[in-house]
Image (cartoon, rainbow, N blue to C red):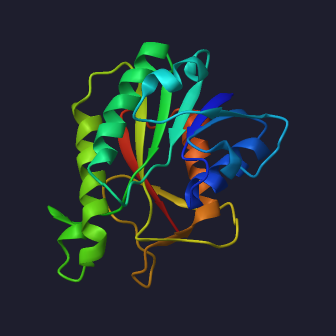
Amino acid sequence: MKIVLFGATGNIGKVILDEALARGHQVTAVVRDPARVASTHASLSVVTGDVGHPESYAQALRGADAAIASLNDHADPANVPKQAGLLLGALAEAGVPRFAWVGGAGSLEVSPGVRVIDDPHFPDAWKPSANAQIAALAVFRASDAKVDWTYISPAAELVPGERTGAYRLGDDRLLVDAEGHSRISIADFAIGVLDRIERGDAPKKRVTFAY
């Protein structure tokens, strides 16, 4: 597939990039600073662009089969839902049919009507980013763009670790193991992201992965 990746220089985006290339996809990474892309893989193209300025990457989207975005803005989290809307519009205009957005776990439910972010022990420092991703999910759900988006929430703990190839797929509920832990390695999370892009099996839905 021809995949356009936004956020390829981030901790999660770098792993998604490696997974996509390992599967034989042609990837175009849209980044603000091309010097930060370490890979020189033959199937990788790097384009200078800014998510906030769709004209900077409009050409890169033409003919693409799918796009993936792994974005965060710790300096100004309010940019995140704006980015979601801009990307949906740009993808629809370019005719890109599939889109995977790496979201947050804060909106996942731990019980009916109670979200991860509602826990009184949820760290205050994480709330701005979590609320921004909650707003981004609302943007997706309200959109009528002709794009089969999939909003992907990680487990509560998304950490560096080995690539086991195993994960469970869920929807709006936080997935936990037999001991009550919710975790997944970034490598296995990337597998789940590429699986959704390749299969197109979660159109206009939120999903989550965990062990």
Residue nearer the viewer, 169 or 25: 25
Seen at 37% across and 18% down, the residue is: 146
Q: Viewed as shown, does residue 198 lie left or right of 143?
A: right
Count of numbered tags:
0
Classify residue 205 by image quadrant: top left
Residue 46 on image: x %, y %: 69, 35
Residue 40 on image: x %, y %: 82, 44
The N terminus: image quadrant? top right
- Furthest residue to the left? 113
Q: Viewed as shown, does residue 112 lie left or right of 53?
A: left
Residue nearer the viewer, 166 or 72: 72
Seen at 29% across and 74% down, the residue is: 125
Residue 159 on image: x %, y %: 55, 72
Residue nearer the viewer, 102 or 188: 102
Whether residue 74 can be seen here: yes
Picture layout, residue 61 above or below residue 30 = above
Q: Viewed as shown, does residue 150 lie left or right of 29?
A: left
Picture layout, residue 181 above or below residue 164 = below
Whether residue 108 can be seen here: no
- Furthest residue to the right? 42
Seen at 75% across and 52% down, the residue is: 38
Seen at 34% across and 65% down, the residue is: 174
Classify residue 109 by image quadrant: bottom left
Residue 35 on image: x %, y %: 70, 48
